[in-house]
Image (spheres, rainbow, N blue to C red):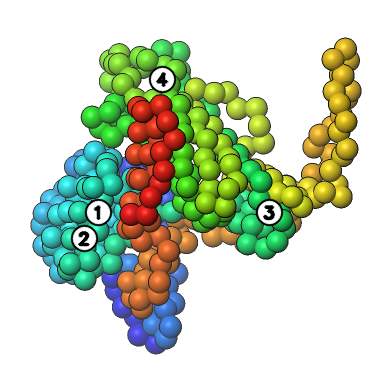
Amino acid sequence: MTVHTIGIILNGATGRICSTQHVANALAPIRDEGGLPVGDDRIVPRLMLAGRNADKLAAVAKSYGAQWTTDLGAVLADPAYTVFFDAAATSQREASLAKAIAAGKHIYSEKPVALSVAKGLELWRAAQARGLKACAVEDKLGLPGLQKLARLAATDFFGRVLGFRIEFGWWVFDGTEVPCQRPSWNYRKKDGGGLILDMYPHWRYVIENTLGPIRRVVTALSTATPERIDERGARYAVDVEDSASTLIELQSGAVGTILSSWATRVRRDDLLTFQIDGTKASAIAGLHRCWITTNAQTPRTAHFNIATDMGVDYRANWHEVADAGPFKNPYRIGWENFLRHIAAGVPMRADLAAGIRDVQFAESCYRSMKDGTWVSLNAL
């Protein structure tokens, strides 16, 4: 067995997602376990953490046995590092990815991969012209609950799919009574903020990989909290949406909804729920668990009583899907797929074109709100 080292630059390494998920839960364990088996070889990642804050970088690097740098240009010029991963601020992503492609690096990117479809296509064409691999993160597909739901959808469990519903979000404090749980850039347009651009790329790949292509969308947006307090204690105006409702029609004809909000208090099974209803059965998944019910288990509801509560337990006929685990960390699944793609050319569904499709979905929702009409998602 031959061991191959792949040098990986992780830009934005001190951010929560990069440090806790991509490094701590994915790449460092792969390295510490002796690498990823790919055929008769093993692929061992060599980590270079990049960012602007030397003290934070040094601390993260020490925790996970990695190297670090604040000189991105210098490490991009180093042939020992063939892969560039970006998890820095959304507003900086296009420029960072463009530099990495120009330096001849394969790229792997957090979402959104660009701020517009046009810019995303520029990156894609540049990577193709240089023969580089270019892929995007699709971590939500690795969630245990959504894996269980996808397995059901891949069989004839539902029959003909009639509809679906995604509900997501929680209450994000504005900073006056309790510190805000999300960074202030998430609420400023110039920094790439906004709920649609942040979360809807996830919903696109979850829906299309589970149920098939989206035909068209219509969306309503709102800003529930117009002012917030930032990390320095300064009040600032929010100029992006923090709540969104979208009606979706699939190519199959099924119609579904997305309800996402940073201004809702949770009273449902999980922070994220995805329900699918079909002619034979229904299922609803959260982050980890999934429940099902069939026609045979569905009660015959004839009416409701205006005067009194009928006392029906509508959850009684739902049954939890047994675990098929153990489940890997979703970010590790993505990295293992990407490393196999780089090392052995194993096809990867989540290429940069998929990331651009995510941006197209977000753009279409914004355009729908602006024009007040349905917007079709045409082939890229």
Q: Quadrant of residue 334?
A: bottom left
Residue placed under numbered mark 1 in the picture: 121
Q: Is residue 147 visible to us here?
A: yes
Mark earlier in primary sequence (2, 3): 2
For mark 2, give the secondary structure: helix
Q: Amino acid at mark 2?
A: Arg
Q: Amino acid at mark 4?
A: Thr
Q: Which mark is residue 223?
A: 4
Where residue 186 sits: x, y (%)?
A: 34, 30
Give the numbered dot on residue 110: none
Which amino acid type is shown beneath numbered disc 3?
Arg
Element assignment for label 3: loop
Quadrant of the rendering where the C terminus is positioned: bottom left
Residue located beneath label 2 in the image = 125
Q: CA distance from mark 3 to mark 1?
A: 35 Å
> Seen in the image, is 12 located left or right of residue 139?
left
Q: Are marks 4 and 3 in contact (CB under 8 Å)?
A: no
Q: Where in the figure is residue 10, as x and y percent of width and height? A: 27, 54
How far from the left and from the top, in percent, is residue 240?
34, 25
Q: Position of residue 80 (x, y in %)?
A: 18, 69
Mark 3 and 1 residues: CB-CB less than 8 Å, in contact?
A: no
Instruction: Find the distance from the CA under tag 2 to the CA under tag 4.
Output: 36 Å
Q: Secondary structure at mark 1?
A: helix
Q: Secondary structure at mark 4?
A: loop
Determine crowd level at label 2: few under 14, some 14-19, many 20+ residues with C-alpha closer than 10 A. few
Q: In front of the other: label 4 or label 3?
A: 3
- Closer mark to the observer between disc 2 and disc 4: 2
Evaluate if marks 2 and 1 touch, with contact meaning CB atoms under 8 Å apart: yes
Q: Residues within 10 Å of mark 4 (few under 14, many from 20)?
A: some
